[in-house]
Image: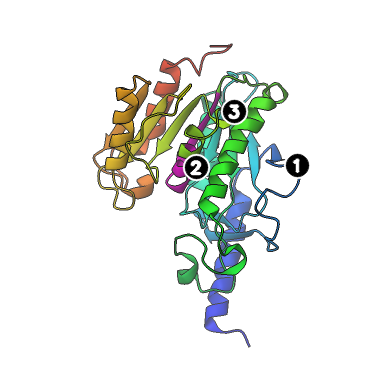
């Protein structure tokens, strides 16, 4: 006999699958690693879909990949941007922090690559409320592992892979950027502060988790675009402000937008946060990443 709880889970799963099918399909799916991702050798469960029709999600990512959304040939400028959705490292918000962003970047002439990085295991039999929690893995197949660190390494590998295979995708190896949201913003910061070969040429941290006043890394530090809402009750605004200050102090180009309203996820509409991608486009244009040819 199917319980009411099980019926609710089945209904939500069906809605999520329907919503997932409505997302624009990628031109290609590109594995980040030639085999099993290092650290995931014992992860023997399947990826799952979750969320709601208007906010489809991906969970239990074992095999990290890039979903390739190329710009139209007529307006492609030779710039690539990785898109790292947020979701507390337990889920990936695949629409408004993923595919929707990729399609908007395509309009700018930018080739977009949505990053499905590894996430904390969510028990598919747990009630929805339990699956919504956050935090590092303490039990289950990932016990003892730092999944957030693995997600950051996936971001670094994504940059490294695109730079190595830039010619294959028709982009320039010195025009590889990354944008990330919330937990995806933490992935962005992992690439910014990581090894030089996995460091992007420019980056955008949108209501990024883990933003603080650390100085830029030694060597070439990427220019930063930063956006957050002043009423963000999840990550707050101060970390983004401090991050901006550190870049300016080090004389590395940076731009900061603190919107009066928007809340976390820019879910509260009616303010400037509704148009943050317009501000991003202006910044990309200012720095030459929307012009055709090499910088």
Circle 2 sits on which residue? 187
Asked if 225 appears above or below 180 in the picture, the reply is: above
Residue 166, image quadrant = top right
Location of residue 171 in the rendering, given as x and y in whole percent from the top left corner: 63, 21
For disc 2, the neighbor class at 10 Å (few under 14, some 14 to 19, many from 20) is many
Q: Nearer the viewer, mark 2 or mark 3?
A: 3
Asked if 51 appears above or below 239 in the picture, the reply is: below
Q: Earlier in the sequence, mark 1 or mark 3?
A: 1
Q: Which mark is residue 34?
A: 1
> For the N terminus, which image quadrant?
bottom right
Q: Residue sitting at 73 percent across and 50 percent down?
A: 36
- Pointer 1 and pointer 3: residues touching (CB < 8 Å)? no
Location of residue 142 in the rendering, given as x and y in whole percent from the top left corner: 59, 62
Residue 169, image quadrant = top right
Gap between marks 2 and 3 measured at Cα: 15 Å
Q: Is residue 261 in view?
A: yes
Query: SS for tag 2?
Result: helix
Q: Is residue 272 in view?
A: no
Gap between marks 1 and 2 measured at Cα: 21 Å
Q: Nearer the viewer, residue 53 or 149?
A: 149
Q: Which residues are magenta?
A: 176-188
Circle 3 sits on which residue? 197
């Amino acid at each position: 006999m199917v319980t009411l709880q099980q019926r609710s889970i089945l209904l939500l799963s069906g809605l999520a699958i329907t919503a997932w099918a409505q997302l624009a399909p990628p031109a290609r799916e590109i594995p980040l690693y030639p085999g099993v991702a290092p650290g995931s050798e014992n992860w023997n469960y399947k990826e799952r879909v979750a969320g709601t029709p208007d906010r489809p999600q991906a969970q239990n990512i074992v095999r990290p990949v890039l979903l390739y959304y190329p710009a139209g040939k007529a307006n492609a400028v030779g710039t690539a941007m990785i898109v790292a959705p947020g979701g507390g490292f337990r889920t990936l918000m695949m629409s408004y922090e993923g595919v929707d962003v990729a399609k908007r970047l395509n309009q700018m002439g930018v080739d977009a690559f949505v990053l499905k990085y590894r996430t904390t295991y969510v028990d598919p039999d747990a009630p929805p409320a339990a699956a919504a929690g956050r935090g590092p893995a303490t039990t289950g197949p990932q016990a003892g592992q730092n999944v957030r660190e693995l997600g950051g390494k996936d971001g670094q590998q994504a940059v490294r892979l695109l730079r190595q295979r830039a010619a294959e995708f028709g982009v320039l190896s010195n025009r590889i950027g990354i944008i990330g949201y919330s937990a995806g913003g933490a992935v962005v910061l992992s690439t910014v502060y990581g090894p030089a070969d996995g460091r992007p040429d420019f980056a955008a941290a949108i209501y990024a988790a883990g933003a603080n006043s650390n100085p830029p890394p030694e060597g070439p530090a990427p220019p930063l675009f930063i956006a957050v809402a002043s009423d963000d009750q999840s990550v707050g605004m101060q970390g983004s402000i401090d991050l901006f200050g550190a870049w300016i102090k080090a004389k590395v180009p940076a731009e900061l937008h603190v919107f009066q309203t928007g809340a976390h996820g820019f879910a509260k509409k009616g303010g400037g946060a509704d148009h943050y991608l317009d501000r991003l486009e202006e910044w990309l244009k200012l720095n030459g990443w929307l012009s055709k040819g090499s910088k």
